[in-house]
Image (cartoon, rainbow, N blue to C red):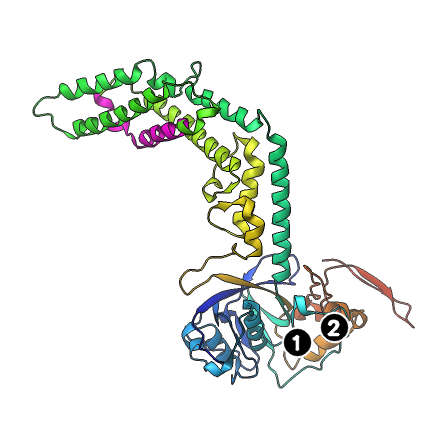
Amino acid sequence: MTTEPKKLKRFLFKFTTNIPDEKKEHTLDPKDLYYSDELNIKLKKTESKVTYWVDYVLNQDSLQFNNKSEVLNTLFNKKRFDNIPISSFSFDKKSSIHENAFVYILNIFNTYPKSNNIKRVSKMSKNHGFKLDPPFSEVPYNYIKINGSPYTVSRVILIDDARAKDQTNKNILEEYKKFTDWKETISGKRSLLEKEMEKEIIRVLGESRKDNLKTLFYKGKSGEMLAEINKAIAGRSPSGKTDIYKNLEIFQKDIEGINAEILDLSKNVINIDNIDDCYTKLNTIYTIMIELDLSHVSRALSKKLFSSYKFKAVIKVLKRFIDHYSIYDALNKERYDPDLIDINIKNISHFAPYIEFLRNIKKIYNPSEFDLRKLEDKIKKKELTEVKDNNDFENEVVNLHIDLIKGEVNDENSKMVGCDYKDNDLVTRLDELMDIKYSDDSYTPLPFYNINEDKKKGKAKTGGKYTRKRKNRSKRYTRNKK
C-alpha cells in the first residue's frame, strides 16, 4: 500500500432469512453468533457496526485470526480494527463498501452442509453444478440466535446492490417523466393550479367568507382593535403595572404589524398576477398571529373583537394558503424542496402527484433542495446519495440473506441432516437451491430444515410445491408449500 488510509467509516449488516412466514429484516449482532468450538464466546466491547477504510480493501490472505472470537472482536470494534497492520490493506479507489463486506463475511461465517457457501448475488453464474461437501470436523459449525432460538448457518449471500441502485435510479427517472407529463397536462393559459390558487386567495381574503382575514381585520376592525388595546393600556392604575399590561403592549405592536400589512393588501386587487407579493404579506401576518397569546390579555379586551375561536380559524385558513402557495411556487419552478414533504395534502389533492414524487426522492436519496430538471445529471454524477456523511461515521447498510437450519448441527446429528438434504428429491434440485441463478434482483432461498421436527417427518420444509417421479420407483414425492 503506497499511502495510508485516512478515513474510517462504519456500516451495519442487515439480513433476511429462509425462516417460513418470517419477512422481518434483522441486524447482525456479534453477540448472537457462536460456534461449535466456541459455544461461550467472549466478546469485548463490540457493537453491531463494522468498520472499513474508505478506498481500501482488507486483504483476505493477509488476515491472521486464530479463532472466530478474534474475528468478531476485531471487525466489530473500531479501535481494534484500527490496529490491523497497514500491510493488510490494498488501495483501490474504485472499490466499494461491498468489497470489504465480502471479505468480512468470509471470515465471520461458516456454512453447512456445503462448506464456504458464501456468495455475492451479482457474481453468481447460472450453472455451477453442485457437490455436497462431507460434514466437516476441522471447521466449526456456525450458529446464530434469532429471537432467542438457535439456528445453524447454511448459506450466506451478500446482496451487492449496485444493480438494484441502477434499477432504482432508472425507476426514479421514469417517475420524473410521468411527473413532467402530468404537469404538462394541467398547464396552459388557465391552468388547473392557477384556478386552485385563486380559490385559496378567495378563501383567505374573500368578502363572503366567514372566519377569514377580511372578516377579522378589514373594514376598520383592526383599527377598532388598536383603539380597544390603547384604551385598556391607558385605563390602568399606577399600581396596576402587572404582566397583563406588558402583554398588552406586546399585543399592541403585533396588531399594528398586522394592520400595516392589511393596509398594503387593500391597495390592490389580489389575483394570480401579484400572488408572490400577496404571499409575502400574508406569511408575515401568519407569523405574527401564531405567536399571539390571547390568554394573557383577554381579561382586558372585548370578547367580541378578540375571539380566540376566530383567531384560530383565521390562522388555519392562513396556514392552508401558505402551504398551497409553497407547493404551487415550487411546482412551477420544478424544485425539490424537502420542507414540502410533510405538508398534509388531504385538502389540496390536486398537488398529490408532485408531493408523492418528492416523497419517493427523499425516501431513496434524502437530498437537500435542488432543481428537478437537473435530476438525471445529478444521478449520473452520483451527487444524490442514500445517506449523508456525519464526520467519520456513515450509517450505511449492507444487505445479506442467510439461509438457516433450525437447531444446532453437531457431529452427532450432521449425518442425519446431510442425508435428509440428499433425500426427498433434493439431489436433483441442489443446483437450483444451493447456488443462485443469476438474476438482477432475485434469488431462491434454501429449504428450511428443522432438526428436531424434520428428523421425525423425514423431510425439509420448502417454499414451493414440486412433484416428480423417481426412476425405478413407483412412489411419488410431493412437497407442500409452507
User: Percent x, y for residue 230?
Assistant: 19, 19
Query: Against 344, is 60 above or below?
Result: below
User: Percent x, y for residue 269?
Assistant: 42, 18
Other residues around mark 1 within 10 Å, as few (<14) / some (14–19) / many (≥20): many
Q: Main secondary structure of the magenta part?
A: helix
Q: Is residue 279 magenta?
A: yes
- Element type where label 2 sits in the image: helix
Q: Which mark is residue 421?
A: 2
Residue interval drawn in magenta: 278-300
**Which image quadrant is residue 26 in?**
bottom right
Is residue 346 in view?
yes
Please indicate whether residue 165 sits to the left or right of residue 456 in the image: left
Is residue 22 in view?
no
Number of dots carrying numbers: 2
**Which image quarter is the C terminus in?**
bottom right
Q: Nearer the viewer, residue 331 or 228?
A: 331
**Which image quadrant is residue 180 in?**
top right
For the point 44% across and 25% down, the residue is 274
Tag 1: amino acid: Tyr
For the point 26% across and 16% down, the residue is 223
Q: Nearer the viewer, residue 463 or 260?
A: 260
For the point 63% across and 57% down, the residue is 166
Other residues around mark 2 within 10 Å, as few (<14) / some (14–19) / many (≥20): many
For the point 72% across and 77% down, the residue is 418
